[in-house]
Image (tube, rainbow, N blue to C red):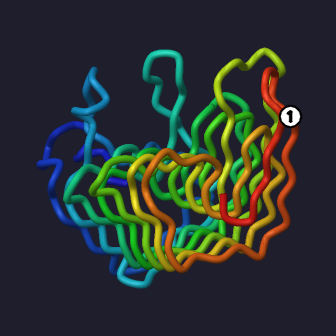
């Protein structure tokens, strides 16, 4: 928690590396994403290497989302920037959230690399974008590789939402990024666009990835639903 606070308050640089040396129990804590306190979202990037070192962060249930414009967003790391790495970490917990509308377990938006990570985190949220690993995997340098989602995802979206709604076992939305050697085992009960690996994609690539979870999708306001084993 001190590391998160020091990054947020600019006590240490946003490219500072970190390595866990023990498991962490967050059941009695509120987790605010690792991010730099700033007005513009692109100034919030974490660009260091966070190495979970094979450890588990458990008991995740109380989250503090970050408001940007009309959106309340959350991830263990808010924005993982180009060159940033999050690896070798397991996160377990149960998130039930009505106010946060974009959620990714390990990152809200990944522009860097997330690898060798496992989510055992169940998410029940009224969120338009949900990803078992990242809400968004965006940019030509974005990589999610060798990651597993075991958590179930359930979304209950208000009927007055007009945004595209997309829920994926690995990423809610993929734009130009690469997802490889990933597995989704969680069941997804989502809205509009649901995918075992990615809910919706524009460009990018999905390689050597599998889904064994059960999928279901409800129609959006203006578009019929779509559920696919991969996307």
Residue 98 position, x and y percent, is 73, 32
Q: Secondary structure at mark 1?
A: loop
Percent x, y for residue 24?
A: 48, 70
2 relative to 59, above or below: above
Q: Quadrant of the N terminus?
A: bottom left
Is 163 located above or below residue 134 in the figure?
Answer: above
State the image coordinates of residue 97 (x, y, percent, origin top left). Answer: 70, 38
Q: Residues within 10 Å of mark 1 (few under 14, many from 20)?
A: some
Left or right relative to 115: residue 18: left
- Name the residue tied to disc 1: 219
User: Residue sitting at 71 percent across and 52 percent down?
Assistant: 123
Q: Is residue 221 left or right of residue 76?
A: right
Q: Residue at x 50, y 74 (%)?
A: 207
Quadrant in the picture for residue 143? bottom left
Compared with 185, 101 (above or below) is above
Residue 187 point in image, percent of width and height: 81, 64
Residue nearest the viewer, comparing 18 with 159: 159
Q: Nearer the viewer, residue 226 or 91?
A: 226
Can residue 3 be seen here? The reply is no
Residue at horizontal 70%, vertical 56%? Answer: 195
User: On the rendered image, what quadrant is the C terminus found in?
Assistant: bottom right
Q: Nearer the viewer, residue 146 or 224?
A: 224
């Amino acid at each position: 928690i001190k590391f998160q606070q020091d990054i947020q308050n600019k006590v240490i640089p946003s490219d500072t590396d970190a390595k866990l040396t023990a498991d962490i129990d967050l059941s009695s804590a509120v987790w605010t994403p690792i991010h730099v306190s700033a007005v513009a979202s692109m100034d919030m990037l974490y660009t260091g290497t966070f190495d979970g070192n094979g450890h588990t962060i458990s008991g995740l249930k109380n989250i503090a989302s970050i408001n940007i414009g009309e959106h309340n967003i959350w991830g263990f790391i808010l924005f993982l920037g180009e060159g940033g790495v999050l690896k070798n970490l397991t996160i377990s917990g149960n998130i039930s959230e009505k106010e946060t509308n974009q959620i990714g377990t390990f990152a809200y938006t990944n522009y860097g690399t997330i690898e060798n990570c496992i989510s055992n985190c169940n998410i029940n949220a009224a969120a338009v974008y949900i990803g078992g690993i990242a809400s968004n995997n965006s940019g030509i340098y974005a990589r999610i590789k060798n990651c597993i989602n075991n958590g179930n995802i359930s979304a209950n979206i208000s009927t007055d939402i007009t945004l595209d709604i997309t829920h994926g076992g690995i990423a809610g939305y993929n734009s130009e990024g690469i997802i490889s050697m990933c597995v989704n085992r969680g069941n997804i009960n989502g809205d509009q666009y649901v995918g075992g690996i990615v809910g919706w994609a524009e460009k990018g690539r999905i390689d050597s990835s599998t889904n064994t979870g059960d999928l279901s999708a409800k129609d959006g306001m203006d578009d019929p639903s779509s559920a696919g084993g991969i996307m």
